[in-house]
Amino acid sequence: VNGITEAAPAVNTVGNAITDATLTTTVNGVSGTALDLTPAIASGTVNALANDGTNTITSTVNGKVATAPAVNTVGNAITNATLTTTVNGVSGTALDLTPAIASGTVNALANDGTNTITSTVNGKVATAPAVNTVGNTITDATLTTTVNGVSGTALDLTPAIASGTVNALANDGANTITSTVNGKVATAPAVNTVGNAITDATLTTTVNGVSGTALDLTPAIASGTVNALANDGTNTITSTVNGKVATAPAVNTNTLALTGTVLNGSVNGVSSTVDLQS
């Protein structure tokens, strides 16, 4: 200026600032337009990620190597027949193990012919009695069998009882009845009581408290009666009935009275008259 020359730097300060992937350059305190470095970073980046076949992940970025385990934690949980696997804290879809359990299960159940049930499942053997309790109850002629607390259909024993029963009843010819049932003997009198009652000419017989039909004795009395009546030729009448003898005078009273020509006679109170003039 006016022939005088001075020298000064054109750029006094240069500054760069990176925020995330953005570069801002400041020259002499004046900031330029921010520059997105993402394309340049991506273009110049070499990124390799490898798994060593076990559990190591190797990351090589722009020549920088880093390693980390692929799996940090593995957990399995079973609820009933469902399996849930959790890897690195992330749970997978629950898996129903029922088909696998069924497919891989060998189940054999056998009875030894006595009272032992043997169960063999996947090689594991367990035994239990086939029958724990047996009970029989009889109500009247019905049998109910209960096995392990389960009652069967009630069985009517009447046909079996009848088929197996031997029953004999005999009278000794006197007054003893003998009953023999299935070898068991019991005796009782045939007749305990006998009673006869006569009302007028009717006989009622009662045996063991049971009354028979009343019997009219009139024909028997008449048939069996012997009746004889005789006069001894004097004044005695003799009556013989069934051997029983009774006597009585033929005439108790005999009176005569004459009234005028009429004769009145009375024998045993029976009167008769005769007119003597007739």
Image (cartoon, helix red, strand yellow):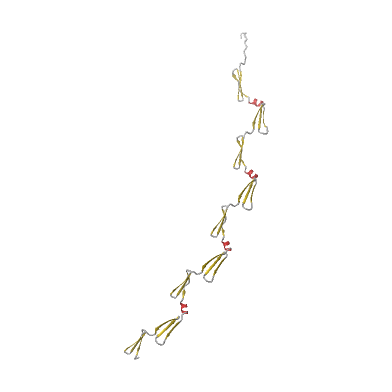
Quarter of the rendering containing residue 102: top right
Residue 25: % across, % down: 61, 20
Give the side of residue 4 with respect to residue 264, left or right: right
User: In which quadrant will I find the N terminus?
Assistant: top right
Q: Of 264 and 123, which appears nearest the observer?
A: 123
Q: Nearer the viewer, residue 150 or 18?
A: 150
> Could you tell me residue 96's position as x and y percent?
61, 42
Position of the C terminus by quadrant: bottom left
Q: Nearer the viewer, residue 81 or 1?
A: 81
Residue closest to the far top: 3
Q: Quadrant of residue 229?
A: bottom left
Classify 26 as above or below 189.
Answer: above
**Left or right: where does residue 192 sit relative to residue 164?**
left
154 vs 204, nearest the viewer: 204
Q: Is residue 263 above or below residue 197?
A: below
The spot of residue 111 in percent (x, y) is: 63, 51
Seen from this angle, which residue lies furthest bottom? 277
The residue most toward the left is 260
Q: Position of residue 85 (x, y in %)?
A: 61, 38
* Callout count: 0
Q: Is residue 44 above or below residue 122?
A: above
* Picture quadrant where residue 24 is located: top right
